[in-house]
Amino acid sequence: MFVNLLLLTVIVTVEAQRVPGLQKTDSCLCKINSSIWTFPAVQFVEVTKEVQTCEENLNEFEEKLRNTDAELPSMGANLQNITARLKAFNYLHTSGLYNALHLRQLNQELEEIHQIVNEAHMENPNNETHNLLSELNKAKNDVQRMYKDDFFNLETMKKRLQDLNNRAQTCKTIPNDFRSTCHQRIMTRISSPRVNKLNSISKSYISGAWGRDALLTNNLHWEHCLVSGHKHGNTIRVYNSHEDFMASKNYKDEPIASSYSDKNAVQGSGTILYDNTVYYQCYETAEICSFNITSQSTKRVKLDGAGIDNKFPFCYYSCRDWTDIDLEADQDAVWVIYATEENHGNIVVSRLDPLELNITHTWKTHLFKRSVTSTFMVCGVLYATRFVSTYQEEVFYAFDTTTGQEINTLSLPFEKVSAGIANLNYNPVDRRLYMYNDGYLLAYNTFN
Ligand SMILES: *[C@@H]1O[C@H](CO)[C@@H](O)[C@H](O)[C@H]1NC(C)=O
Ligand SMILES: *[C@@H]1O[C@H](CO)[C@@H](O)[C@H](O)[C@H]1NC(C)=O
Ligand SMILES: *[C@@H]1O[C@H](CO)[C@@H](O)[C@H](O)[C@H]1NC(C)=O
Ligand SMILES: *[C@@H]1O[C@H](CO)[C@@H](O)[C@H](O)[C@H]1NC(C)=O
Ligand SMILES: *[C@@H]1O[C@H](CO)[C@@H](O)[C@H](O)[C@H]1NC(C)=O
């Protein structure tokens, strides 16, 4: 089995001239010695100059792959592509990574978090807000000390801030009934496919999304296939019952935009239907659109820093194009899953108010988006899956937005009929998981 994770980290010391790496369980592994983070700030620039990429080792790795006769479709090209893409956004060798860690920015972030927690505390003082405030004050003192001593561990401080921020986001007013409706949280099992059907248009439409309205209980089923290089779409096919959906009859094709190159057209396969409203990535921009089928009106909101156009797609052994932005829904909210350079390509989760279409909360995870095949949300918990084989997928990770906790120990396998996943979404009404699997439409029951 091929593990497609490409782990890229770097060893740097002030003296080192190159970055050694090694092949380990089919990955190119270059290791960073974390003690490097403890050094005076003045040496920063010097160090960044010394950093070299893993490129040499990648080439070696690629050579080895070519020489094994394993069936790894386009692996070589893909590796080269990843290298090229990493280079394109200067993932390793610009000082960008370090800029983000700059002290002044730390201070600014601290202030922002402080403000969020302060507001939450004024509104509803409780132990968590109280504890957060005292931790924040402690962190502020630490940053002041860093300024004075010019000696610090930025990596640790950055992680601490991220954790504080995630907890602060959770403190912000999430509806009071949020927890109560969703107790019994983490999923424990996924059934075999209960629905397995080819999409109603053509087997050649390998990308898209499908499901059932995530709020309404009227059994509204929907199907959305991407055209134009599996990239764009402008209609959504809706059925009033499961029977009609299964028979591919009595459907209505609702126009979302006038053409698939209209500014309101759909880009990518992250689409969801909630309250008879389609939520999706707007054509060629880092914006979320909502199209209310009832009122025939479109709204849009900007998603700050979100990578688009295959900058941070979901990947398995090869990347799935146009999966930069993934919309999900649960009973109270619409969620959007994406990645930013600021968070080093790791997954960022934002919660949207479905009616106002504005972003109310944002959490940053430590999960590299390219190491994941797909994601879905259940009760404020983000789940991520990984490719096991053509016919098997596995949920391996969860991030709980109500606690800010990451769970790396999950192993919930489930079957599929083809290798590639264009979309996975959870429906809170029937508690089913819906998958667009290379043109096949699959649904599963879930258990917790
Ligand atoms: C990391 O670097 C420090 C200082 O250069 C060294 O003492 C330590 O042994 C290194 N650790 C590893 C795991 O290589
Ligand atoms: C490499 O990535 C580019 C986009 O950056 C894409 O157009 C191209 O098809 C990719 N090549 C392979 C072999 O995946
Ligand atoms: C909050 O703190 C008080 C006093 O320290 C304690 O009695 C109470 O149980 C705490 N509440 C929660 C929900 O932890
Ligand atoms: C869609 O429009 C209808 C009619 O104007 C309205 O009642 C409903 O709340 C809207 N839904 C959303 C999600 O905006
Ligand atoms: C969302 O929009 C509403 C109405 O415009 C506004 O009252 C609210 O403060 C906004 N929330 C955020 C987080 O921007």
Image (cartoon, rainbow, N blue to C red):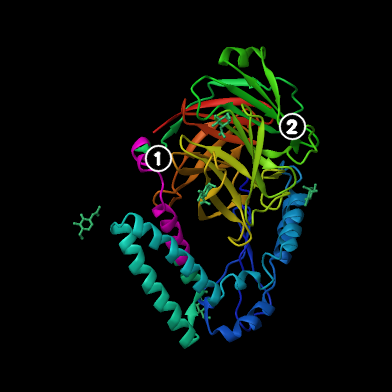
Which residue is rendered at x = 39% and y = 43% of the image? Answer: 175
Which residue is rendered at x = 43% and y = 39% of the image? Answer: 379
Magenta highlight range = 161-181
Residue 176 position (above or below residue 164): above
**Res 420 seen here:** no
The residue at which mark 2 appears reads as 234
Q: Is mark 1 within 8 Å of ligand 3?
A: no
Prevailing secondary structure of the magenta residues: helix
Residue 268 in percent (x, y) is at 70, 40
Q: Which residue is more in the foreground, 171 or 308?
A: 171
How far is mark 1 from mark 2, CA to CA? 35 Å
Residue 106 position (above or below residue 355): below
Q: Mark 1 near mark 2, Cβ–Cβ under 8 Å? A: no
Q: Quadrant of ligand 4?
A: top right
Image quadrant in which the C terminus is located? top left
Image quadrant in which the N terminus is located? top right
**Res 114 seen here:** yes
Q: Which residue is more in the foreground, 31 or 307?
A: 307
Q: Secondary structure at mark 1?
A: loop
Q: Quadrant of residue 101?
A: bottom right
Residue 110 in percent (x, y) is at 47, 69
Task: Identify which amino acid the numbered label 2 is placed on.
Answer: Asn
* Pointer 1 local density, CA inside 10 Å: few below 14, some 14–19, many at least 20: some
Which mark, by number, is residue 366? none
The residue at which mark 1 appears reads as 186
Q: Is mark 2 within 8 Å of ligand 4?
A: no
Q: Secondary structure at mark 2?
A: loop
Task: Identify which amino acid the numbered label 1 is placed on.
Answer: Ile
* Pointer 2 local density, CA inside 10 Å: few below 14, some 14–19, many at least 20: many
Residue 168 in percent (x, y) is at 42, 58
Q: Is residue 201 left or right of residue 178?
A: right
Is 145 in the magenta? no
